[in-house]
Image (cartoon, rainbow, N blue to C red):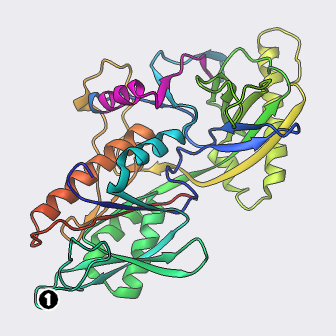
Amino acid sequence: MRFGFAVTLLDLGRSAGGRLASRRLATPDGTEWRFDHGAPFFTAMTDEFRLIVGDWSSAGIVAPWLGRFMFLDEIGLAFERAITRWVGVPSMSALPRRLIESAGDRIAVRNSFRAERLELTCDGRFDPSRRSGAVISRESARPLWRIHGTNSRGAAEALGPFSGVILAMPAPQASRVIAASRDHSSVEMLQPLSGELGRLSCRSAWVTMLAFESRVPIDADVISVRTPGVIARAVRESGKPGRRDSGDGSVATEPDRWVVTSTDEWAATRLDEPRERIAVELERAFRQLVRSLARSNGAPAPDAPRTMLAEAHRWSLAMPRRTPAPRRELEDETNDPRAAMTPTLPTAHDGRVIACGDWSAGEGVEAAFLAGRAAARRLSAHLEASYFEEPFVPGVFERRE
């Protein structure tokens, strides 16, 4: 948008944001509480992203989380390195929602749309005065893209035409879209994307959202588990800033809320299990974790309090496993940002079709932001240098499972 183009955002979910996702769940008394069941927090390691996060903080969209971040390994429990971690306020999903609202009519959003394939078409030049476009001349026709998929009513629908497309999604999903596009349209110009995306993969995860009637006896807000087993991470949702009210904005007696994420190895063999069974197993594993931490400190092994709520959610494509960009572990916030994340963007059709995601630059919110901005810059540059004399409508779509 900032490059002078209108944007159409297509998202598989009921709201945009991917892993910047939040759920409202009700405890037995009927009170709804928020849970960030996707990305629990994020960091800002590069100068470019720090400037953006600073603006978000000034606008009240995000806040620093000054919690107790711990990791558990074979030796025991220890503090994570001291860096600033950020959360959306009052939830992680508030961040993409506020960004879309701030764009106004410069962006059109279609939620609950499953994008399935691209179709290359030559409909003629686009009339920029009409949102739907119009053919001006077949002789001046240039390649445009239609996006075929399934809408919220379960009906097939084709959208477009668009001058360019950014596939902002996990690499395996983008690979499936490209493969279906080549099968239906024989679009050889998409061939470069097939090979690059086909080499990438993702980790899966189950998460369980738990609410306890009193505080869980763990003196930590986040525990990252670095030993093999069931749990990869446990996050005290109620310890985040801006979370001390119920989902409807009223103040209520707050339960201790946790989001427990499984390991990839544990989830991979249980992706088709019923959510109810997963919720029970992850709650049991969390209770065992609470008892083991108490024993490691030489204290009695208390159990977690009574559970008021337990709900599981599956992320079949949770985080990138193989990426085109080398992983870089930044030791602290003073590292030279030039040595930080540089997105790798698979492209086709002379830069008019671009695939990106956090996998383009590593993993996480910052990597996703840097990749998305780089993709927008590249697409805009190609469109401005193209045959078209008028601005066209680039299509962007994103989906998660």
- x and y, in percent, of residue 55 in the image: 34, 28
Specify whether residue 236 is in view.
no
Q: Quadrant of residue 152?
A: bottom right
- Is 79 located above or below residue 176 in the figure? above
Q: How many marks?
A: 1
- x and y, in percent, of residue 57 in the image: 41, 25
* Residue that label 1 marks: 137
Q: Amino acid at mark 1?
A: Ser
Q: Quadrant of residue 130?
A: bottom left
- x and y, in percent, of residue 166 in the image: 33, 61
- Can residue 57 be found in the magenta stretch? yes
Is disc 1 placed on a helix, strand or loop?
A: loop
Q: Residues within 10 Å of mark 1 (few under 14, many from 20)?
A: few
Point 28% across, 60% down: residue: 6
Tell me if 365 is positioned left or right of 216 in this view.
left
Q: Nearer the viewer, residue 273 or 26?
A: 26
Q: Which residues are magenta?
A: 49-72
Point 52% across, 44% down: residue: 20
Going by the picture, which residue comes out furthest to the bottom? 138
- Can residue 230 be found in the magenta stretch? no
- x and y, in percent, of residue 260 in the image: 70, 37
Tell me if 168 is positioned left or right of 85 in this view.
left
Tell me if 306 is positioned left or right of 154 in this view.
right
Tell me if 48 is positioned left or right of 390 in this view.
right
Q: Nearer the viewer, residue 39 or 264?
A: 39
- Is 361 located above or below residue 299 in the figure? below
Point 49% across, 17% down: residue: 81
Point 77% across, 26% down: residue: 252
Q: Quadrant of the C terminus?
A: bottom right
Specify whether residue 109 is in view.
yes
